[in-house]
Image: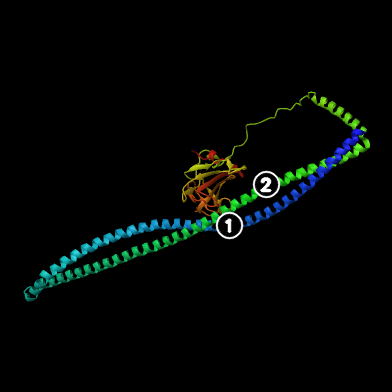
């Protein structure tokens, strides 16, 4: 009985101490909940700002992609026009040569007409003894005069054509230079805006990461405090039950504990007996089965890479600092503006800006095979276009929030990621 009274007194003292701890822990838990609510509010605000900046970034990068496409088209036009200018320059040289020859012939005819024409014609008028010779000579002089007139007319036409050619050359050069200057200016302005928005997005990402870390820490504090509080409450409840049992059935409780100890020992001895393992029949496995068919499936290990470059990230590697996320494709470093080529013929099923991937092209190769090309600078193909293997579909860039120009390249097989290194040679 004395032992029961002593246990009851100790239980009362411990209950008072645990009650104080519970009140203090509850206050800490309430404060932590308030901190978590405030952090979630701040995270929500930062996320809204991120969404706005990403929306603006999407518009800017999409517009830059279209502008880069226009620049490339203009450069192709410049090449064609340069060929036309070369042709006009050759024509100009030929006209200049004709002009020089015609000037020389006209000068010779003029000197001949001046030196002998007037005297022979005067002698012919004074000497009328042979009428037939007189008629033939007049015809000859008329023919020579008409020839000189035709030569002068042709010379004037050559001068006119030469002037038109020079005018066309100057006009085309001025027009193309003006267009290129305008596009370069627009591209510089857009690039400046894109960099500003990328910087703003990076700043928001840092802020969001810091707030998220704080929130995670406070949530962990909340979880730990909740566990402590639960432990205290369970301890208080258990002590209350033990005190009640000590007051009423101290001796019976001791006897029951002894019986329980004996039962536990018996159960422990029973658990120590060896158990006969159950027999499990061997599982049957088969190496047969249908292989994937079709042109793309037959290209495993034979396809070319979409660009020449260096692998920055490999399939299955940890993505960033988060060990929970893995790369489902590869990242290939290449200079901005490098043409990205289709690794296999197919149809474009997506060509637009996508959050996290920037300007993205997706090709459907049939039989459930897709290839993806992301973070482009510009898109050269649109949805619905049919492309051939090796055909340029985009240009390398850093859209979608990348720091450096690189191409995201991935292959999907029936919706599942597949290692591109198993498909591409080299």
User: What is the number of the mark on residue 217?
Assistant: 2
Residue that mark 1 sits on: 53
The relative height of residue 297 versus residue 265 in the rendered view (above or below) is: below
| Residue 269 appears in the picture as rendered | yes
Q: In this view, does 361 lie above or below 281?
A: below
Quadrant position of residue 409? top right
Name the residue at 39% across, 56% down: 79
Label 2: which secondary element: helix
> Residue at left 33%, top 57%?
86
Q: In terms of image quadrants, where is residue 142?
A: bottom left
Q: Where is residue 58 in the image (x, y as percent from the top left)?
A: 56, 56
Residue 323 in the figure: left or right of residue 388: right
- The location of residue 5, given as percent across then percent down, is 90, 36
Q: Which of 27 and 122 is in front in this view?
A: 27
> Mark 1 vs mark 2: which is more N-terminal?
1
Label 1 element class: helix
Q: Position of residue 381 (x, y in %)?
A: 51, 53
Callout 1 touching callout 2 (CB < 8 Å) = no
Q: Distance between the residues labelled 1 and 2?
A: 27 Å
Q: Nearer the viewer, residue 269 or 316?
A: 269
Residue 66 appears in the rendering: no
Q: Residue 398 carries which label?
A: none
Q: Is residue 233 left or right of residue 66?
A: right
Count neighbours of disc 1 (C-alpha within 10 A) and say few if under 14, some if 14 to 19, many if 20 or more: some
Name the quadrant of the N terminus.
Answer: top right
């Amino acid at each position: 009985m004395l032992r029961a009274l002593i246990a009851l007194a100790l239980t009362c003292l411990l209950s008072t101490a645990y009650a104080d701890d519970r009140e203090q822990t509850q206050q800490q838990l309430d404060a932590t909940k308030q901190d978590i609510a405030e952090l979630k509010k701040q995270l929500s605000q930062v996320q809204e700002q991120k969404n706005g900046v990403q929306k603006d970034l999407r518009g800017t990068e999409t517009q830059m992609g279209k502008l880069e496409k226009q620049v490339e088209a203009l450069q192709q036009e410049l090449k064609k026009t340069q060929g036309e200018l070369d042709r006009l320059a050759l024509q100009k040289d030929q006209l200049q040569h004709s002009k020089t020859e015609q000037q020389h012939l006209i000068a010779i005819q003029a000197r001949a007409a001046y030196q002998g024409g007037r005297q022979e014609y005067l002698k012919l008028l004074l000497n009328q003894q042979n009428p037939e010779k007189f008629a033939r000579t007049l015809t000859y002089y008329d023919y020579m005069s008409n020839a000189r007139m035709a030569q002068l007319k042709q010379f004037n036409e050559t001068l006119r054509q030469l002037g038109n050619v020079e005018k066309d050359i100057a006009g085309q050069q001025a027009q193309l230079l003006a267009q290129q200057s305008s596009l370069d200016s627009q591209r510089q302005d857009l690039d400046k805006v894109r960099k500003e928005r990328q910087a703003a997005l990076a700043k928001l990402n840092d802020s969001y990461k810091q707030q998220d870390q704080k929130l995670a820490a406070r949530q962990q504090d909340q979880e730990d405090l909740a566990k402590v509080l639960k432990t205290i409450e369970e301890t208080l409840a258990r002590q209350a039950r033990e005190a009640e049992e000590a007051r009423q059935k101290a001796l019976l409780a001791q006897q029951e504990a002894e019986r329980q100890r004996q039962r536990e020992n018996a159960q422990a001895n029973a658990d120590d007996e060896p158990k006969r393992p159950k027999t499990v029949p061997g599982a049957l496995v088969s190496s047969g089965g249908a292989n994937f068919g079709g042109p793309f499936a037959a290209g495993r290990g034979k396809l070319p890479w979409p660009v020449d470059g260096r692998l920055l990230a490999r399939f299955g590697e940890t993505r960033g600092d988060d060990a929970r996320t893995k790369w489902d494709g590869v990242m290939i470093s290449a200079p901005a503006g490098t043409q990205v080529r289709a690794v296999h013929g197919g149809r474009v099923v997506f060509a637009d800006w996508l959050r996290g991937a920037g300007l993205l092209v997706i090709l459907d190769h049939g039989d459930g095979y897709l290839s993806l090309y992301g973070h482009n600078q510009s898109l050269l193909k649109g949805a619905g276009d049919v492309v051939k293997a090796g055909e340029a579909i985009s240009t390398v860039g850093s859209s979608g929030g990348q720091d450096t120009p690189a191409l995201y390249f991935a292959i999907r097989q029936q919706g599942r990621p597949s290692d591109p290194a198993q498909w591409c040679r080299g």
